[in-house]
Image (cartoon, grey):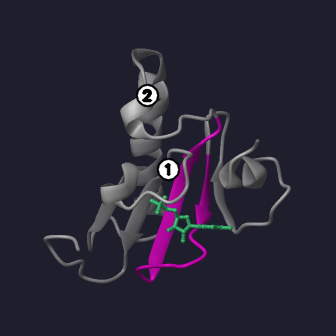
Amino acid sequence: MKTLFQKIIDREIPAKLVHEDDLCIAIHDINPQAPMHVLVIPKKLIARVAEATIADRATLGHLLLTAAALAKKLGVAESGFRIVINNGQDGGETVPHLHVHLLGQRPLGWPPG
Ligand code: AMP
C-alpha cells in the first residue's frame, strides 16, 4: 500500500508543492508548526532514517542540501531555521515515509517538546 507521501508524489492527493527534482519533492506542511513549515520527502520509500542504508547516502545528503537551499529560497537563511527528522513513536513520527521538516520564520524553542 502507498504511503500518504507516495500518494502526494504520484499526484493522487493534492499538496502545495515547493520543489521537485529527480530524488525528492518538497511541500508545505498541512498543519504548520511555524510560519514556514516545509517537508522534504524522498521519492524512494525509506520508512524512517533508522532504516536507511549505505545505498541511501546520496538521497539522505540530497534531502539536507535541498532543505538548506529551500531555506535560502524561502528567505530564512539569514534569520535561521531548524531541520527536524522524527523517528519512531517517541520521536513523534506519524507518517512512515522519511521526511525532513524545515521550520522557520519564528524563534524556535530549545529543548524541543
Ligand atoms: P511526522 O509527524 O514527523 O511523521 O510528520 C508528518 C507531517 O506530515 C506532519 O507535520 C503533518 O502535519 C504532515 N502532513 C500530514 N498529512 C499531510 C498532507 N496531506 N499534506 C501535507 N502535510 C501533511
Residue type of the residue flagged with mark 1: His
Q: Is residue 81 above or below residue 55?
A: below
Instruction: From the image, tell me which residue sits under label 1.
Output: 99
Classify mark 2: residues with Cα within 10 Å, few (<14), some (14-19) or many (20+).
Answer: some
Classify mark 1: residues with Cα within 10 Å, few (<14), some (14-19) or many (20+).
Answer: many
Residue type of the residue flagged with mark 2: Ala
User: From the Cβ of disc 2, is ligand 1 less than 8 Å away?
Assistant: no
Quarter of the image with the C terminus in it:
bottom left
Quarter of the figure with residue 64: top left
Q: Residue furthest right?
A: 12
Residue 75 in the magenta stretch? The answer is no
Q: Which mark is residue 52?
A: 2
Part of the protein shown in magenta: 25-43
Q: Position of residue 85 (x, y in %)?
A: 37, 52
Residue drawn at x 48%, y 58% as measured from the top left: 70
Q: Residue furthest top?
A: 55
Measured Cα–Cα span from mark 2 to mark 1: 12 Å
Residue 34 in the magenta stretch? The answer is yes
The kind of secondary structure element at disc 2 is: loop
On the rendered structure, is 40 left or right of 11? left
Q: Position of residue 80 (x, y in %)?
A: 26, 69
Can the viewer see residue 72 in this picture?
Answer: yes
User: From the Cβ of disc 1, is ligand 1 less than 8 Å away?
Assistant: yes
Q: Is residue 31 above or below residue 4?
A: below
Q: Position of residue 100 (x, y in %)?
A: 44, 52
Q: Nearer the viewer, residue 109 or 17?
A: 109
Q: Position of residue 65 (x, y in %)?
A: 41, 42
- Upstream in sequence: badge 2 or badge 1: 2
Quarter of the figure with residue 13: bottom right
